[in-house]
Amino acid sequence: MSCWHIAPHAAFYVAEQTSHHPPKSSYFYIIPEHGIRIDGLVEPMSRFLGNSTAAMMNGLTKLTLLNVLDEKTGQPEVYTLSQPNMYARGILFGGLKFELGDHLYIKVSSSSLVADVDFKTKGLISGTYNAIQGVIEQGHEKLYEISGKWNEVMEIKDLKTKKTSVLFDCFKAKPLKPKVRDISEQGEFESRRLWLKVTDALAERNHTVATDEKFKVEESQREAAKKRVEDGVEFQPKLFRQLTIEESAEFGNEHLEFVIYKDHALKHDAVKHDVKKMEEHVFEIAPFLPGQKFNDKFEIPAYEKLKEHA
């Protein structure tokens, strides 16, 4: 599990592994004050490519603008985003380098607009790192072209007017560092606490200790999974519930599989524009801020929590 926030009462994020076979993790992010919500599922797969390794980021991100309503349906505008893959080059020889590659697709619920952004990987001889090239289309008509570097400056060109403007300038943007509670306050399975000995060993470049500690964590997880099988207990996430068949048919939910268990309450809060209530429901999910404690319902599977409120 992973929990963090950006400044008190601003943005909140939580993620949890929702499937072990195959491994999948669900995540939830929300900025109550600005009506921005993100739900997602990631199913990473590893590939070894000679001197490179790749993390294939299967899954989907659903972005909901709670305060932007569709004129026809009256429902919040929803976007879906796929994810580019991640590559580590030079793992055996040469300089180690990380880059993003392949396509990112963005679709919107209110129209037929589609964005296709190609994250270019550097060739052996030519090319450059971090370059992107994309297009925004409606039907078969190209409306805009996107170019630049995703870590520097990205530009967008209107194909009708031929005018080019800056889409996003990373040099002028101010990143906000995520904040987490102190290790002593974190739960047993929160990622930073769970992997602390591994990350500390890596920071000290002690790969032997890092490997040993990694094995201990993974072996503990395997033993827990084995015991569940022996006891006839099915793995159930604590913070996310499975979507119903009807919910899975909604735009943006096709590949989501899971959603935060406070979904209905948060949607009700959004309709009423009740930011305070939305924050209260977020804090009932898990402790985000320093000093907040796990409530007595935290360890209960998400579907059981919903039964109690039914």
Image (spheres, grey):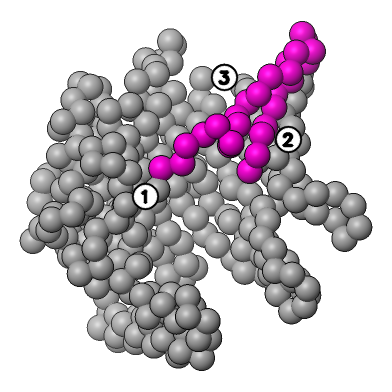
Q: Is residue 17 magenta?
A: no
How far apart, in angstroms, are the residues tagged by discs 2 and 1? 27 Å
89, 22: nearer the viewer? 89
Above or below 130: residue 62: above
Give percent across and percent down for residue 164.
74, 18
How far apart, in angstroms, are the residues tagged by discs 1 and 3? 33 Å
* Identity, as a three-letter code, of the amino acid under mark 1: Pro
Give the mark nearer the N terminus: 2 vs 1. Answer: 2
Secondary structure of the residue carrying tag 3 is loop
* Identity, as a three-letter code, of the amino acid under mark 2: Gly
* Identity, as a three-letter code, of the amino acid under mark 3: Ser
Secondary structure of the residue carrying tag 1 is loop
Residues at marks 2 and 3 touching, judged by CB atoms closer than 8 Å: no
The residue segment tinted magenta is 151-176
255, 172: nearer the viewer? 172
Secondary structure of the residue carrying tag 2 is strand
Q: Residue at x 52, y 34 (%)?
A: 173
> According to the image, label 1 marks what residue?
178
> According to the image, label 3 marks what residue?
111
How far apart, in angstroms, are the residues tagged by discs 2 and 3? 26 Å
Q: Where the N terminus falls, by quadrant?
A: bottom left
The part of the image, by quadrant, that contains residue 56 is bottom right
Res 265 label: none
> According to the image, label 2 marks what residue?
148
Q: Is residue 235 left or right of residue 163?
A: left
